[in-house]
Structure formats: structure tokens, C-alpha cells
Image: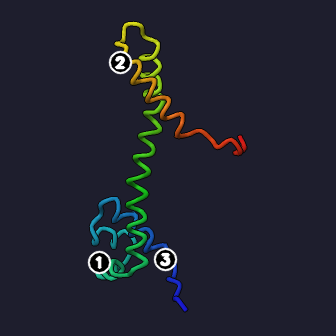
């Protein structure tokens, strides 16, 4: 039988958030009202380190996702402009069309999917 890890306390969760945002162990400890040695001990706890990894991954991927989402309309506008421009070189227009078609193919739903 596998032991289920106990959930982290609110203090541990807040300390983990502060550590991921760049606080030192002493700063995180002071913020949550524990001794620095307690945070050092938490850092050796598998559940705490798993939470730290989860928060780092969320921060990294969340930021990337937000940036991509924010830039997507501009990228589509640039593709539209390149496709519509008669002054743009034909090779650029073909490259823009290929990029747009590749993207459209990657997001199309299977024929049996509901809208």
C-alpha cells in the first residue's frame, strides 16, 4: 500500500510561492511566521519540492502561453498583410500562405468532433 502524501499547509504553500518568486529561505520564513530552519526542512520534503517544481513549471509555461496568445492576433495580421500585398515578393506570400495553412491544419477538429 502506497502512502498518500499529506497536503501542504497554507504556510508551506505561501512559502513555496514566495520561494518561486525569488525570496530567500529566510525571507519566506519571515513572511509565513516560521524559522528559516523550518523552510530548510520543508525543502527536503518531497511534497514541498513537488509543489516548488509545479509552481516553477506553471510560471514558465503560463507566461509563455500568455505571450503567445497576446502575439497571435499580430501574427495573423502580418500573415494577412503579406498574403494581400501585391508588392510583397511572391516567395514571401507563398511562405505566409504555407504557414497559415499549416497552422489551420494543426487546429482543425476531426470530422466527428462536435463544434
Q: Position of residue 96 (x, y in %)?
A: 42, 24
Q: Position of residue 63 (x, y in %)?
A: 40, 48
| Secondary element type, mark 2 | helix
For the residues labelled 2 and 1, say whether their Cβ atoms are less than 8 Å apart.
Answer: no
Of the numbered discs 3 and 2, the one sitting upstream in the chain is 3
Q: Nearer the viewer, mark 2 or mark 1?
A: 2
Real-space Cα separation, disc 1 to disc 3, in angstroms: 16 Å
Real-space Cα separation, disc 3 to disc 2, in angstroms: 59 Å
Q: Which residue is mark 3?
A: 9
Q: Nearer the viewer, mark 3 or mark 2?
A: 2
Q: Is residue 83 above or below residue 23?
A: above
| Secondary element type, mark 3 | loop
Q: Is residue 45 above or below residue 15?
A: below
Real-space Cα separation, disc 2 to disc 1, in angstroms: 61 Å
Category of crowding for the residue at label 2, using alpha-carbon neighbours closer than 10 angstroms: few (below 14), some (14–19), many (at least 20): few
The residue lying at 34 percent from left, 59 percent from top is: 21
Q: Which mark is residue 8?
A: none
Q: Position of residue 55 (x, y in %)?
A: 41, 62
| Figure coloring | rainbow
Residue 40 figure quarter: bottom left
Image check: 108 left or right of 11?
Answer: right
Q: Which residue is mark 1?
A: 36
Category of crowding for the residue at label 3, using alpha-carbon neighbours closer than 10 angstroms: few (below 14), some (14–19), many (at least 20): few
Count the labels in the image. Answer: 3
The residue lying at 43 percent from left, 70 percent from top is: 51
Q: Nearer the viewer, mark 1 or mark 3?
A: 3
| Secondary element type, mark 1 | helix
> Which quarter of the rendering shows the C terminus?
top right
Of the numbered discs 1 and 3, the one sitting upstream in the chain is 3
Q: Which residue is mark 2?
A: 91
Amino acid at each position: 500500500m502506497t502512502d498518500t502524501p499529506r497536503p501542504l499547509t497554507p504556510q508551506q504553500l505561501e512559502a513555496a510561492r514566495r520561494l518561486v518568486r525569488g525570496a530567500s529561505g529566510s525571507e519566506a520564513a519571515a513572511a509565513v511566521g516560521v524559522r528559516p530552519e523550518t523552510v530548510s526542512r520543508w525543502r527536503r520534503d518531497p511534497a514541498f519540492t513537488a509543489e516548488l517544481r509545479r509552481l516553477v513549471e506553471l510560471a514558465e509555461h503560463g507566461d509563455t502561453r500568455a505571450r503567445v496568445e497576446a502575439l497571435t492576433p499580430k501574427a495573423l495580421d502580418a500573415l494577412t498583410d503579406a498574403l494581400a500585398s501585391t508588392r510583397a515578393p511572391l516567395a514571401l506570400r507563398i511562405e505566409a500562405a504555407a504557414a497559415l495553412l499549416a497552422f489551420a491544419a494543426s487546429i482543425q477538429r476531426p470530422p466527428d468532433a462536435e463544434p
